[in-house]
Amino acid sequence: MRVKIALLLHLYQPVTQSEEVFRRVYADSYAPLIKKISKTKNISVSIDLPLSLLEQMDRYGYQSWIADVKELVRLEKLEIVGSAAYHPLLSKLPKNIIEKQVILNEYGIGYYFGDLQNLEGESAVLLRDVVGFFPPEVSVNERVLSVLDSLGYKWMIIDESSIPFDLNYQHKHGVYQFKDYSAKLVCRNRSFSNMLSFKRDLDVEEITDALRFFKANDKSFAVVMDGEFFGHHYGEGFLVFDKLIESGQVLDIEFSTVSSYVEDEAPVLLKDFVEASWGASDQDMSEGTNYPMWCDPSNEIHKLQWDLIDTVLSFYKDDYFMTEVEDYATLPIWKAEGLSQISNSVLRKKVAKEVLLQKSLHSDQFWWASKKTLPAGEFLYDPNMIRKGLQVIENFVELYFGGKDLALVQEKIARIKSVLEES
C-alpha cells in the first residue's frame, strides 16, 4: 500500500473581517488555490469552508468561486468537511451551542454546495459524503466528540496536544479510536503541518527529508493547516505547494483526502483524550494552558472576554430553533433575504436571534487579544478587531436582553473597552 499524505486545508475569515481585507485574501490565496488544486494532477484534498467564509464569498460576489469548488467536489478533487458555522472554540461551549453551530454550518454547506431539490422536485437540501469534521482552532474535548458522533460524523481532527504525555507512542499522529465512539480521532502530524504553515523561504530540503523518512518507515499521516498560507501568509506559498507535491510524487507518495487516509488506517485504541487546541505546545499543556491564543489565564483581556461570553450564555434562553426551522432548511437564514421568507414573525425573530448569537462567539476576538508572537514573527494584538467582536455581542444583547441582564452585560463590555483604551 502506498504511503499517503492526507492534506486538509482550513479556509476562514471572521464575521468581523473588512471587505478590503477579504478581497485581498481572495486575490492572494483563495482564487489561485482552487485553480492550483484543479490543475494539479493526481491529488485530492480535504477542505474546510465554514459558513463564516461562504457568507462573505456570497456577499462580495464570488459565486463563480463557489461553483468552481462544487465542480471540484463532483470530480472528487476536493472533499468538503464539516465545521462550526462561525468558528468558535467548541470545547469551551455547552452542548446545545455546539450542536447549533454544527447544524447551521451543515445548512450553509448544503445551501452553497448541495442540490436544492430532491428526486421528486421538492425543495430540499441534499448533500452527500460530508463525513469528516474540522473543529475551529482544533479546540476539542470529549463533549465535542460526543456531539459529532451523535450527528453521524465518521472522523474529527485533533492535534498531538490532545494525546496524553504518558502514552509512549512512537508517533502521536495517526488515527485513533476513543471509548465506544464510532467517530475516529485523526491526529494531525503537528511538526510537518507547522513546518509548512510557518515556512517563509523556498528551501525545501527539510520537507523532502521528512518525506523520505516517512516513506522509508511506510508511515502515512495527515497535514492540517490554514489554506491562507498559500499566497497570503506567504507570497511564495504556491511554490512551496508545488515543491511539496513534486517531492512527494517522486517518492510515489499519494496525496489523498483525509477520509481516504482513515479508510486505510487501523485505528489505535486511545486510553485518554485531553482537552486542547492546535495552538498549545507541549510546554503550554504542561503548564495547564490549553488555549494560549484564546484563553490564556495570565491575559487580562482574555479573562474579561470569557467572563462576558459566559455571562451572555448564562442569560441565553435555548429556543431549539434548528428543529423548528427545518421547513426552511433551503433558506439562507444567515442573511436578510432568507429570513424575510419565514412567514411566522415570531419564528423569524427567533432565528435571527440565534444566528446573531452564534456569530458573536467567533474565535478571532480572543486571537487578536492574545499578545503572542507567531513563529513567523507576527504579533497578535489588534484592538480594532477586539472592538469589532464586542460590537457583535452588543448588537445581540441590545436586541434581545433587557433590564438587569442588559445592564450587567453592558457593564462588562464597557470594562473591556476601558482596558483597551489603557493598553
Image: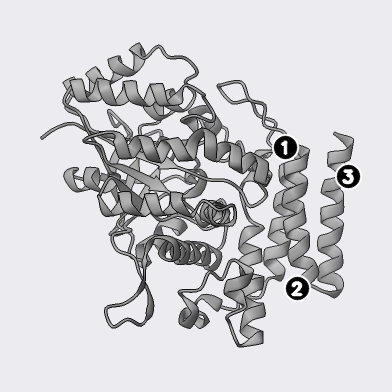
The residue that label 2 is drawn on is 400
1 or 3: tag closer to the N-terminus: 1
The residue that label 1 is drawn on is 299
Horizontally, residue 337 falls left or right of residue 248, namely right
Alpha carbon distance from label 3 to label 2: 24 Å
- x and y percentages locating residue 416 in the rendered image: 82, 47
- Closer mark to the observer between disc 1 and disc 2: 2
- For the question of whether residue 304 can be seen, the reply is no
Q: Callout 3 environment at 10 Å: few (<14), some (14 to 19), or many (20+)?
A: few
Labelled disc at residue 321: none
Q: Nearer the viewer, residue 82 or 315?
A: 82
1 or 2: tag closer to the N-terminus: 1
User: For the residue labelled by badge 3, is the local secondary structure a helix, a strand or a loop?
Assistant: helix
- Amino acid type of the residue that numbered disc 2 sits on in the rendered structure: Tyr
User: For the residue labelled by badge 2, is the local secondary structure a helix, a strand or a loop?
Assistant: helix
Q: Nearer the viewer, residue 117 or 269?
A: 117
Q: Which image quadrant for residue 209?
A: top left
- Amino acid type of the residue that numbered disc 3 sits on in the rendered structure: Ser
- x and y percentages locating residue 232 in the rendered image: 53, 30
Q: Residue at 22% x, 46% y: name it.
A: 260
3 or 2: tag closer to the N-terminus: 2
- Amino acid type of the residue that numbered disc 1 sits on in the rendered structure: Asn
- x and y percentages locating residue 236 in the rendered image: 47, 21
Asked if residue 377 is positioned above or below residue 50 in the image, the reply reads: above
The residue that label 3 is drawn on is 418
Asked if residue 204 is positioned above or below residue 347 in the image, the reply reads: above
